Amino acid sequence: MTDRIRDFLRARRDMGQDEGPVMVLDLEVVRDNYTAFARALPDTRVFYAVKANPAPEVLRLLAEMGSCFDTASVVEVEMALAAGATADRVSFGNTIKKERCITRALKLGVRLFAVDCEAEVEKIARAAEAAGVEAGDVQVFCRILCDGAGAEWPLSRKFGCVPEMAVDVLEHAYRQGLTAYGVSFHVGSQQGNTGAWDGALASAAMIFAECAQRGISLQMVNLGGGFPTKYLKAVPGVESYGDAIFRALTKHFGNRMPETIIEPGRGMVGNAGMIEAEVVLVSRKSDAEDEVRWVYLDIGKFGGLAETMDESIRYAIRTEHDEDRMAPCVLAGPTCDSADVLYEKVPYPLPVSLSIGDKVLIEGAGAYTTTYAAVAFNGFPPLQQYVI
Ligand SMILES: *Cc1c(COP(=O)(O)O)cnc(C)c1O
């Protein structure tokens, strides 16, 4: 926790305004993270993945620092523009777009689009015509599948096509008059293995070579996100990722280095935010001595902790009793949905002295929390956020 977050939470409590869970995000940490990415990958453009935390203050800071933005919808495009980014610093990175949204984005000035099949290429070609934009001014990159091994939040098979198909998709774009610009992939979010980019870069180099044989000269490799933030386990620093990626690029592209892009989300904002929540109930299901305690918080899966799904992301949780004896607990949220259990398969150690009304601090909560909170499921308001 940063001093600024500690002071903020203390002041809030002193004023008696500490009702409900809250996420506090320290912009100074985001600033440091951006600087670290820019240093670790000096020849790479940073496109912040807006979905990780679209708070206007975060977007404004990053726009000021020179970041570009990876967006997934017209609303996210508009948020990036409102924060001060020009349209040439915005990519529409979702491979699944309505044609009218592509037209809208083109009219807003966006020229960089992700695809993973020919049907999406055709939508873009038609949208360019509808928007009165020269097809050749529209840059298209094709996303390839990545198995996500080593990632705690893998992105599965929903996005991307096999590398062999990417060559055809890019050729299709070229034949439609669009600019076949490059290749993208995502190695899976919270990727703990710095070597995870190597295999995908080998595929990217193969696609570049195949396209060159067909007379199409690709220029860009989008290295995606995946850079981790610290939860319970330590993770390698961003410099290690920069080194490993640079080595893999050199290995597969030699001295014909492509332009590169990264799209960090979690790694940019995760460690900047902390949630303060409250213990609503501590109970047991029977009087048996070895029965685990159930600890219910005022935040759960529907209040911002959606990434505890399948117990994938294991947050670091701190209490005011952490020097006391610990015992495993089942940790659950406050709603009347039995899916709203955070950790049960692997119970979470919490102090035996933890009791009703105690505050708990959930660290590393700056990414994928506030916007994953339901609007009012069961009457619980969405997670409040303060950006300081
Ligand atoms: C979500 C997303 C990202 C960000 O991923 P992180 O693992 O949070 O860095 C980057 N690129 C695309 C296309 C995404 O969908």
Image: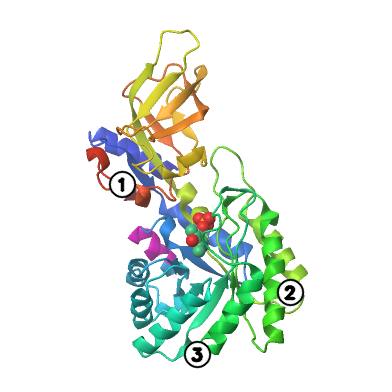
What range of the chain is rendered magenta? 55-62
Query: What's the amino acid at mark 3?
Result: Gly
Label 1 vs 2, first from the N-terminus: 2
Evaluate if marks 3 and 1 touch, with contact meaning CB atoms under 8 Å apart.
Answer: no
Left or right relative to 46: residue 242:
right
Query: What's the amino acid at mark 1?
Result: Ala
Asked whether residue 60 is drawn in magenta, I would say yes
Q: CA distance from mark 1 to mark 2?
A: 45 Å
* Residue at the disc numbered 1: 374
* Residue at the disc numbered 2: 253
Which label is found at residue 5? none
Mark 1 vs mark 2: in front: 1
Q: Residue 310: image x %, image y %?
A: 50, 39
Q: Is residue 154 above or below residue 180?
A: above
Q: Is residue 369 above or below residue 285?
A: below
Instruction: Decide if residue 310 is in sight here.
Output: yes
Kindly identify the residue that appears in the image at 63 percent across and 67 percent down: 162
State the residue in front, 102 or 36.
102
Which label is found at residue 136? 3
Query: What's the amino acid at mark 2?
Result: Phe
Label 1's element? loop
Asked whether residue 355 is drawn in magenta, I would say no
Badge 2: few (under 14), some or many (20 or more) residues near its Cα, within 10 Å? some
Kindly identify the residue that appears in the image at 42 percent across and 68 percent down: 63
Q: CA distance from mark 2 to mark 3?
A: 26 Å
